Image (cartoon, rainbow, N blue to C red):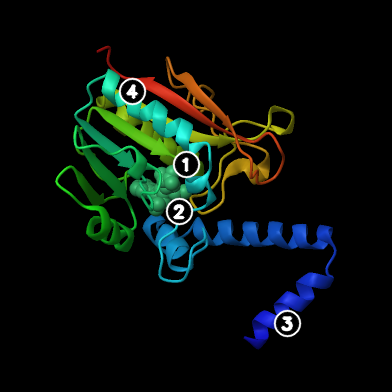
Amino acid sequence: MLVQKVKGAVKSVLPASALALRRRFKRYARSFRDQNLPLEQVFSDIYKKNLWGGEAGEFCSGEGSSLKTNAVYCQYVTEFIARHQIKRVLDVGCGDFQVSSKIVDPGFEYVGLDVVEPLIASNQQKFGKQHISFQCLDVTVDELPQADLILIREVLQHLSNQQINTILEKIKHVPYAIITEYQPQRDHLRSVNIDKPHGMDTRIWDHSGIYLEAPPFSVPGVEIVLESAIEDYLVHPGERLVTYLLRHKSK
Ligand SMILES: C[S@@+](CC[C@H](N)C(=O)[O-])C[C@H]1O[C@@H](n2cnc3c(N)ncnc32)[C@H](O)[C@@H]1O
């Protein structure tokens, strides 16, 4: 308690530039530590310490899960599922299920996948039904269940370029993938797809983001189907969530 009070008092007298420097140092220290830890441990720790928000004991996947732009995304996915008569959906890195809970429907089977075991157990207990289930797996390592459509939303941005390429290779057997990731405003883009170790931060702090059409991913035929401006931007105004559609087989 006293430590928290002292920390708060120190923060209140530091100038903004010193606080920004402190935040940057913490990010570097975190990413240096995380690169040597197993992926499962890094993401479990984020939830355990509520680093993406929520109260102690809750599972919270962060701000991105409560943005107004989610409504546009959910409408797009819902229409896509109906139009393509999708029967089974895998949600890779389903997190706290806040977003996909607006998509599920008894007309198709939904399987949420995440590497964090206690999160999956909690989701299964709270939301599991005949057409909704959750499985714990690491998508960079484990075999994926069969599906007609894969959803990946704000997951790749937390992984290294090598891990992303592994996932893109693994999902090739699924006819469709809808992938949504964070990008900076164009004037603030320094370089696309800057590499980073797996962990809580995204490339936005390095003025970068995930661009599936560009190296080292260069996904053939990838199409941008949605672009939504973020109101509560992280670094600069104009940041956006971009949704890609990947077709692996003509249907
Ligand atoms: C920022 S959250 C996004 C959650 C959700 N998709 C959303 O949009 O709200 C990223 C999630 O991906 C999960 N994740 C990261 N790497 C993973 C992997 N290799 N396999 C399965 N899940 C992973 C994390 O545990 C976390 O729950």
Q: Quadrant of residue 166?
A: top left
Q: Residue furthest top?
A: 250
The residue carrying mark 1 has its beta carbon less than 8 Å from ligand 1: yes
Residue that badge 3 annotates: 6
Tell me whether the residue at label 2 lies in contact with that at label 1, contact meaning CB atoms closer than 8 angstroms. Answer: yes
Quadrant in which the N terminus appears: bottom right
Q: Is residue 117 above or below residue 73?
A: below
The residue carrying mark 2 has its beta carbon less than 8 Å from ligand 1: yes
Q: Residues within 10 Å of mark 4 (few under 14, many from 20)?
A: some
Q: Nearer the viewer, mark 4 or mark 1?
A: 4
- Distance from disc 3 to disc 2, alpha carbons, whole Å, reads 29 Å
SS category of the residue bearing label 1: loop
Left or right: where 8 falls relative to 42: right
SS category of the residue bearing label 4: helix
Residue that badge 1 annotates: 154
Residue that badge 4 annotates: 80
Q: Nearer the viewer, mark 4 or mark 3?
A: 4
Tell me whether the residue at label 3 lies in contact with that at label 2, contact meaning CB atoms closer than 8 angstroms. Answer: no
Q: Residue at x 47, y 61 (%)?
A: 46
Quadrant in which the C terminus appears: top left
Tell me whether the residue at label 4 lies in contact with that at label 1, contact meaning CB atoms closer than 8 angstroms. Answer: no
Q: Mark 1 belongs to which amino acid?
A: Glu
